[in-house]
Image (tube, rainbow, N blue to C red):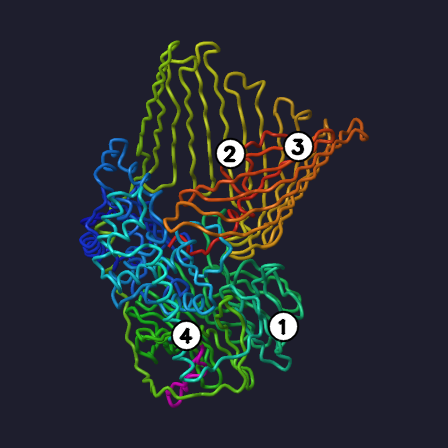
C-alpha cells in the first residue's frame, strides 16, 4: 500500500492491525523529517509481518528499509506506547534518517549507488548515538510522553547500576557488543538514551540537531568533536558530568524511599540476571518452581522448598520462560517460552504442559503468552496472532477454545488470572495499562483508570495483587500493591529501591520477583504491611466494539506486491602501477544486488588487469527463508593457463526442535572445480545442535556431526567427524574427533580461558578490546595401518581479541607448536569468525575453531537488541 511518503508491504491478514499506523504514518514521517531536517534518498519501504511472537523490528538505513514484527510487547521493552507498530516505527525511522545524514562530499559517492555513501557512513556512527536518538524519538513523536526514555523499568536498570558503583558510561556503548557486563536493556540502549537525555535537559532539543550537523560535516573526526563544539565542554568532562548527574539521581531516589521507610523482602535466590520467574503450589505440601539463571552451572527450572532449599532440577524446557504456572492440585505444570517452528520460519510463544510427577510432556499449545489455571482441566489464556491478543478459555481434555475477549476491540491483554467465577487481566487501552474484570458472558469492567502501569496479576480470596509503577512522578519504580475487590481500596505492600514484580501470597509470606544490581531474584517478605495508598477505584463498565470496515478500507487501497532483485551499489577502485620495466593498470569492482525485502542477495566482485591474470571474477548468491542457501562461483582467466573456475555452495535448514535460542540445523555443502570437476569434487553434510542458556553469559554447548566425501571415490575419500563446544563464563573446552577409514583417527581438544577481561572501548565506538585469552590444544593422530606410529601435536598460545569500527572482530594470536620433533613459534592476525562452520571445511583431520573473545560471537543477545 502506498501512502504519501511510504510504501507499506504487509502480510495478508494484518489489515486491521496496521490500520492505525497507516492513518498516522505520513504525519509522523513529516514531523520527524522536519525535526531532523533530512529525508531518505528513496521512498521508505516498511515490511510488516506476523512470523514471530517476539516483539522486535530492525532497519537497514542504507537501503531505506524497515521491517516490523506486528505483535506488540508486554513491558519487556516498554509499557509506554499506544499503538505498537507506530511506536516502533518512530524508533526505526530514526536509524533510517541517520543513514541519510551525510555531507556533500559523501553525496558524491551516490554515483556508485544510493546506498553506498550510507554504508560507508555507518562505520563512523557510534551505536549509543544511533540507539539513544531512536529512543529519544520514541518519546518525542509518540503520544502520552511514551517510550523508554521515561520508562520506569529502564530507569530502574540505570539506577541500580549507579548505586552499585557499576555505572558503565560510554566505553562499552559505542558499539562493542562482546562484553561480559549485565545490562538487561542493552548497554547501547540504556546508556545511549540516558546520555542523549542529559544533553537535551542541559542544552535543549536543538543541541541534538546541531551535534548531528557538526558530526556529519566531518564524521571521520568523530562524534566527540561535534559534541564538544556544540556544548563547549571537553568530552571527558561532559561524560563525567553526566555520570555524576545519574549518581545523584540514584542517591536522591534512595533518600526518598528511605524517608518513606524501605519495605523489602529477603533475597531467597542469589543467581541474578533473568532468575526469579516462578509459581507456588499451595496444597498440603507446598513447593516452588523457579527459573534460575546461572553463569557457572546449568540454568533451568528448579524445584525448591519454601525456605529456598533446592530439591532438584525440574525439567529442561528451553531458555528463559515467560511464565511458569502450577495447576491447583499440583498435578500439572504449564511453561510458556519461545520455540522455533516450521523449519526456522517462525518463532512462536508456546505453552508446554508437563506432568509434575513423571515430567512427561503432555502437549504443546502454540501462540499462548499468558495463562491462569481454573482447575486441572481448564485454564484462561492469552493468545496472540495477527497483531492482536485475545482472552480465551482452553479446555485441556479436548483442546477446544472459547473466545471471551476479541483483541480487535482495541484492548491488549498482558497478564491474566482466574478469580473464582470471573477473569481478571491487565491490558493496554488507549496507551494506558490498567486492570480489567471480564465476565464469562463478555461484560467488561475497568477497575483502574490512571497513567500508572499495572502488571503481574494474582488473585487471593477477594484480593488482587499486582505490580505497578508511578509513571510520570519523579521517583517511579515498580512496587507490589493489593486491591480489595469488595471495598475497591488500594494498599501498598513494598517500598523498594530496585523493583518488585510478580507477587504471590502463601500463608503470611509475600513472594515476589525483585530486581537488584545483579538482576532478578526471588524474594520473600513475612507479614507484609498493607498500607493504604488513599486511592479508591471504581468498577466502570467498558463498551468496546470491533470495526469491520478497517480491513476493507486497507484492502481497497492495497495492491499485490511484487518482489524483485535490483542492482544497488557498484563501486570501482582503479589502480595504476608504473615502473621502469612495466606499466600495470587494474580496476577492482563490486556489484551488489538484493531484493526489495532484503531476503536474497547477489554479490559480484573481482578485478580486471593488463597483467598475466586478466580477469578474476567472483559471484555469490545467498538468502532464503525455510531453506538457507549460499552459492559461490569463481572464474579466472590468464594469459598462460586460460580459463579456470570453481564453484562451491551450501544449503541449510533449521530443525523444528528447540527454542528461539536453541535451534538445530542440517547443512549440506559442496566444492567443485569447473575446469576438471572429475578430479576435484567434494561434498560435506553436517548436522549441528546447540544450546545457549542465557542471553548475556555462558552455559553454551554446541555439538556437530559431519561427513565429507568425493562422490567419484567415496570409499577412499570418506571422512567422519564430530565436535562439541562447552563453555561458561570462566572456561571453555572443545573436544573433536575425526575418522578417515582409509587413513586413521584424529583426536583433539581445545581448552581456553580468559587471563584478563578488559572490556573497554572508545567514546566513538571505533575501537574496543575485550580480553586476553590463554589456550592449549593437544591433538593425536593414530594411523590404522600402524597403530604404533601415532603422531602428537601440542599448541599453546594467547589471543588478544578486539573490535574495529564497531563490528569487525579481530584477533591476534601468539603461540608455540610442538609436532613431536620440532618446537616452533607462530602468530596469526585476522578476522575472528567465532564458532561457525569452518570456512576451510576441506581441511582433513582435527577441526578446531577458536571463538571470538571466549566465544562472545556465539553468546545469545537480548531478543530485543535489534529494537
Q: Which mark is residue 845?
A: 3
- Earlier in the chain: of badge 3 and badge 2, it is 2
The answer to whether the residues at label 2 and label 4 have Cβ atoms under 8 Å apart is no
Number of other residues with Cα within 10 Å of mark 2, as a class: few under 14, some 14 to 19, many 20 or more: some
Write down the region rendered in magenta: 480-496
Relative to 509, say whether 763 is above or below. above
Q: Using residue 143 as the reference point, say whether residue 158 is left or right of it.
A: right
Q: Which mark is residue 478?
A: 4
Mark 2 against mark 4, which lies toward the viewer?
4
Q: Secondary structure at mark 3?
A: loop
Say which residue label 2 marks.
Answer: 650
Mark 1 against mark 3, which lies toward the viewer?
3
Q: Tell me the distance, in whole angstroms, between the alpha carbons under discs 1 and 3.
A: 47 Å
Residue 275, x across and y down, in percent: 54, 66
Q: Tell me the distance, in whole angstroms, between the alpha carbons under discs 1 and 4.
A: 26 Å
User: Which residue is drawn at the image coordinates 46% and 34% (left, top)?
Assistant: 630
Amino acid at each position: 500500500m502506498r501512502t504519501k511518503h511510504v510504501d507499506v508491504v504487509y502480510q495478508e491478514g494484518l489489515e486491521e492491525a496496521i490500520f492505525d499506523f497507516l492513518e498516522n504514518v505520513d504525519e509522523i514521517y513529516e514531523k520527524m523529517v522536519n525535526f531532523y531536517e533530512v529525508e531518505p534518498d528513496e521512498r521508505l519501504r516498511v515490511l510488516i509481518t506476523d512470523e514471530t511472537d517476539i516483539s522486535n523490528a530492525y532497519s537497514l538505513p542504507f537501503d531505506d528499509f524497515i521491517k516490523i514484527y506486528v505483535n506488540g510487547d508486554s513491558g519487556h521493552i516498554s509499557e509506554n506506547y499506544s499503538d505498537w507498530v507506530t511506536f516502533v516505527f518512530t524508533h526505526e525511522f530514526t536509524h533510517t534518517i541517520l543513514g541519510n545524514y551525510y555531507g556533500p562530499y559523501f553525496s558524491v559517492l551516490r554515483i556508485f549507488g544510493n546506498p553506498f555513501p550510507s554504508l560507508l557512513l555507518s562505520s563512523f556512527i557510534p551505536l549509543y548515538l544511533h540507539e539513544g536518538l531512536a529512543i529519544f524519538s520514541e518519546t518525542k513523536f509518540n503520544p502520552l510522553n511514551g517510550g523508554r526514555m521515561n520508562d520506569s523499568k529502564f530507569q530502574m536498570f540505570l539506577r541500580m547500576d549507579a548505586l552499585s558503583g557499576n555505572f558503565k558510561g560510554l566505553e562499552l556503548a559505542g558499539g562493542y557488543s562482546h562484553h561480559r557486563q549485565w545490562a538487561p536493556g542493552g548497554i547501547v540502549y540504556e546508556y545511549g538514551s540516558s546520555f542523549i537525555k542529559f544533553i537535551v535537559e542541559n542544552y535543549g532539543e536543538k543541541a541534538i540537531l546541531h551535534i548531528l550537523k557538526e558530526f556529519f560535516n566531518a564524521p571521520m573526526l568523530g562524534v566527540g568533536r561535534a559534541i564538544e563544539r556544540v556544548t563547549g565542554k571537553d568530552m571527558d568532562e561532559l561524560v563525567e558530568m553526566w555520570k555524576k548527574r545519574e549518581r545523584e539521581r540514584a542517591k536522591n531516589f534512595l533518600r526518598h524511599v528511605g524517608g518513606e521507610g524501605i519495605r523489602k523482602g529477603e533475597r531467597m535466590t542469589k543467581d541474578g540476571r533473568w532468575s526469579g520467574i516462578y509459581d507456588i503450589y499451595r496444597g498440603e505440601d507446598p513447593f516452588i518452581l523457579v527459573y534460575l539463571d546461572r553463569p557457572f552451572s546449568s540454568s533451568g527450572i528448579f524445584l525448591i522448598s519454601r525456605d529456598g532449599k533446592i530439591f532438584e532440577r525440574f525439567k529442561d524446557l528451553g531458555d528463559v520462560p515467560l511464565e511458569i504456572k502450577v495447576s491447583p492440585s499440583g498435578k500439572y505444570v504449564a511453561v510458556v517460552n519461545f520455540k522455533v517452528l516450521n523449519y526456522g520460519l517462525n518463532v512462536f510463544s508456546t505453552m508446554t504442559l508437563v506432568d509434575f510427577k513423571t515430567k512427561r510432556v503432555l502437549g504443546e499449545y502454540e501462540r499462548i503468552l499468558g495463562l491462569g489455571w481454573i482447575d486441572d482441566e481448564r485454564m484462561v489464556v492469552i493468545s496472540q496472532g495477527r497483531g492482536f491478543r485475545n482472552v480465551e478459555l482452553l479446555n485441556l481434555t479436548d483442546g477446544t477454545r472459547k473466545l471471551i475477549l476479541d483483541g480487535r476491540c482495541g484492548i491488549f491483554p498482558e497478564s491474566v488470572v482466574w478469580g473464582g467465577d470471573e477473569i481478571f487481566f491487565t491490558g493496554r487501552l488507549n496507551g494506558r495499562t490498567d486492570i480489567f474484570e471480564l465476565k464469562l458472558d463478555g461484560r467488561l469492567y475497568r477497575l483502574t483508570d490512571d497513567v500508572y502501569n499495572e502488571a503481574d496479576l494474582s488473585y487471593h480470596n477477594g484480593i488482587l495483587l499486582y505490580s505497578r509503577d508511578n509513571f510520570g512522578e519523579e521517583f517511579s519504580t515498580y512496587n507490589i500493591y493489593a486491591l480489595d475487590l469488595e471495598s475497591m481500596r488500594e494498599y501498598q505492600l513494598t517500598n523498594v529501591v530496585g523493583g518488585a514484580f510478580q507477587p504471590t501470597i502463601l500463608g503470611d509470606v509475600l513472594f515476589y520477583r525483585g530486581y537488584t544490581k545483579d538482576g532478578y531474584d526471588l524474594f520473600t517478605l513475612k507479614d507484609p504491611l498493607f498500607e493504604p495508598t488513599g486511592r479508591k477505584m471504581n468498577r466502570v463498565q467498558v463498551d468496546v466494539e470491533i470495526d469491520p470496515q478497517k480491513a476493507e478500507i486497507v484492502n481497497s487501497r492495497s495492491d499485490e506486491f511484487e518482489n524483485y532483485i535490483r542492482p544497488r551499489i557498484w563501486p570501482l577502485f582503479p589502480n595504476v602501477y608504473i615502473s621502469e620495466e612495466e606499466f600495470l593498470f587494474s580496476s577492482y569492482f563490486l556489484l551488489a544486488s538484493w531484493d526489495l525485502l532484503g531476503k536474497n542477495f547477489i554479490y559480484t566482485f573481482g578485478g580486471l588487469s593488463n597483467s598475466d591474470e586478466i580477469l578474476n571474477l567472483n559471484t555469490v548468491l545467498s538468502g532464503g527463508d525455510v531453506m538457507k542457501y549460499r552459492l559461490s562461483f569463481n572464474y579466472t582467466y590468464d594469459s598462460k593457463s586460460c580459463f579456470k573456475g570453481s564453484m562451491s555452495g551450501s544449503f541449510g535448514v533449521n530443525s523444528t526442535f528447540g527454542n528461539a535460542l536453541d535451534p538445530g540445523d542440517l547443512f549440506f555443502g559442496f566444492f567443485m572445480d569447473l575446469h576438471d570437476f572429475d578430479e576435484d569434487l567434494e561434498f560435506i553434510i553436517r548436522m549441528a545442535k546447540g544450546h545457549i542458556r542465557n542471553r548475556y553469559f555462558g552455559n553454551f554447548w554446541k555439538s556437530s556431526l559431519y561427513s565429507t566425501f568425493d562422490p567419484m571415490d567415496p570409499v577412499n575419500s570418506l571422512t567422519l567427524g564430530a565436535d562439541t563446544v562447552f563453555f561458561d563464563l570462566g572456561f571453555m573446552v572443545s573436544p573433536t574427533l575425526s575418522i578417515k577409514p582409509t587413513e586413521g583417527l584424529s583426536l583433539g581438544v581445545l581448552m581456553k580461558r580468559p587471563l584478563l577481561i578488559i572490556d573497554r572501548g572508545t567514546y566513538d565506538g571505533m575501537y574496543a578490546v575485550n580480553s586476553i585469552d590463554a589456550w592449549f590444544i593437544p591433538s593425536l593422530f593414530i594411523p590404522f595401518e600402524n597403530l604404533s606410529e601415532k603422531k602428537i601435536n601440542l599448541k599453546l598460545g594467547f589471543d588478544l581479541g578486539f573490535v574495529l569500527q564497531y563490528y569487525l572482530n579481530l584477533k591476534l594470536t601468539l603461540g608455540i607448536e610442538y609436532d613431536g620433533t620440532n618446537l616452533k613459534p607462530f602468530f596469526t592476525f585476522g578476522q575472528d569468525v567465532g564458532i561457525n562452520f569452518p570456512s576451510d571445511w576441506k581441511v582433513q583431520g582435527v577441526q578446531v575453531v577458536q571463538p571470538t573473545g571466549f566465544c562472545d560471537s556465539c553468546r545469545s543477545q537480548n531478543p530485543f537488541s535489534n529494537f
